[in-house]
Image: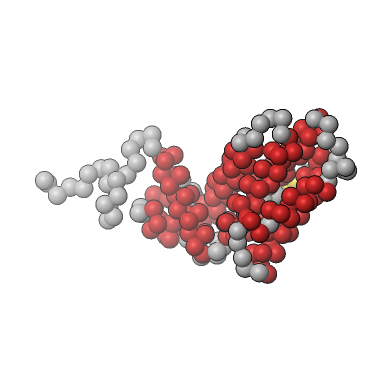
């Protein structure tokens, strides 16, 4: 041994560096660690570059190779968590046959509620930053609206299958989403309780009410 630190080991912590081409894996590890810290902290206020680096086992400088500052890290975390939520909704929907269009809508909203109830810190951050206007007076855009569009597409399939709605598919999606969000927020902020089973009966009833 010549006392030199191997090039693929982070100085000072003994963690093996990601080799060439593995940068995306490190980015994923950073976002996963930031997500765990967010859950522990209950919000983003205490989330720091140094704290995330410590959780991953790397130097803070390694995070700056992927995120220029804390704000960009938070934006990356938002994208990561919204992708995780969208995937859980997709997977839940696909557990049912394509002909069970109403059941597939319920499965999506159940997956949404499960995520929201089990991840209160993530959920607060996501809802606060899920939509914005690129230009003043322009239409709002963002991953939150993409989720509502996903629900709207589910209600559209219900109509195509012969299940009449009291309102348009887009309005049905908005009504169910807003109702589910309100129920989740009630348990989070007022009752300080978690567990999807607390909100699922309510959202099931809400889904039923939008059908004629």
Q: As displayed, is residue 127 above or below residue 103?
A: below
Q: Nearer the viewer, residue 206 or 125?
A: 206
Q: Is residue 72 visible?
A: no
Q: How many marks?
A: 0
Relative depth, front residue between 22 and 179: 179
Query: Left or right of 153: which side holds 13?
Result: left
Residue 55 location, quadrant: bottom left
At horizontal 72% and vertical 30% (from top left) the residue drawn is 99
Q: Residue at x 43, y 47 (%)?
A: 29
Q: Is residue 195 left or right of residue 98?
A: left
Q: Residue at x 38, y 58 (%)?
A: 54
How far across and how far down the image is residue 195, in percent?
60, 58
Residue farthest toward the left in the current orientation of the protein: 1
Residue 25 pos. (x, y %): 42, 41
In the rendered image, which quarter contains the C terminus?
top right
x and y percentages locating residue 106 in the rendered image: 70, 44
Q: Is residue 110 or residue 129 the one in the foreground? A: 110
Residue situated in front as seen by the camera: 88 or 78 = 88
Inspect this view and state whether residue 203 appears: yes
Q: Which colouring convention does the figure follow?
A: secondary structure
Residue at 45% across, 53% down: 33
Instruction: Tell me where residue 100 appears, x and y as whole percent.
Output: 71, 34
Indicate whether 54 appears above or below 168.
Answer: below
């Amino acid at each position: 041994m010549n006392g030199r630190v191997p090039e693929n080991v982070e100085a000072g912590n003994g963690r093996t560096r990601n080799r060439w081409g593995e940068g995306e894996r490190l980015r994923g590890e950073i976002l996963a660690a930031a997500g765990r810290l967010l859950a522990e902290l209950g919000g983003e206020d205490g989330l720091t570059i140094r704290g995330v680096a410590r959780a991953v086992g790397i130097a803070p400088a390694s995070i700056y190779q992927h995120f220029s500052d804390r704000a960009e890290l938070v934006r990356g975390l938002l994208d990561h968590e919204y992708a995780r939520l969208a995937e859980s909704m997709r997977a839940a929907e696909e557990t049912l046959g394509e002909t069970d269009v109403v059941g597939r809508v319920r499965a999506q909203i159940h997956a949404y509620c499960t995520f929201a109830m089990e991840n209160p810190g993530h959920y607060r951050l996501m809802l606060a930053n899920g939509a914005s206007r690129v230009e003043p007076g322009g239409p709002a855009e963002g991953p939150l609206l993409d989720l509502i569009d996903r629900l709207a597409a589910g209600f559209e399939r219900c109509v195509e299958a012969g299940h009449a709605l009291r309102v348009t598919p887009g309005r049905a999606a908005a009504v169910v989403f807003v109702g589910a969000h309100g129920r989740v927020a009630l348990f989070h902020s007022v009752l300080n309780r978690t567990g999807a089973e607390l909100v699922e009966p309510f959202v099931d009833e809400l889904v039923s009410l939008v059908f004629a």
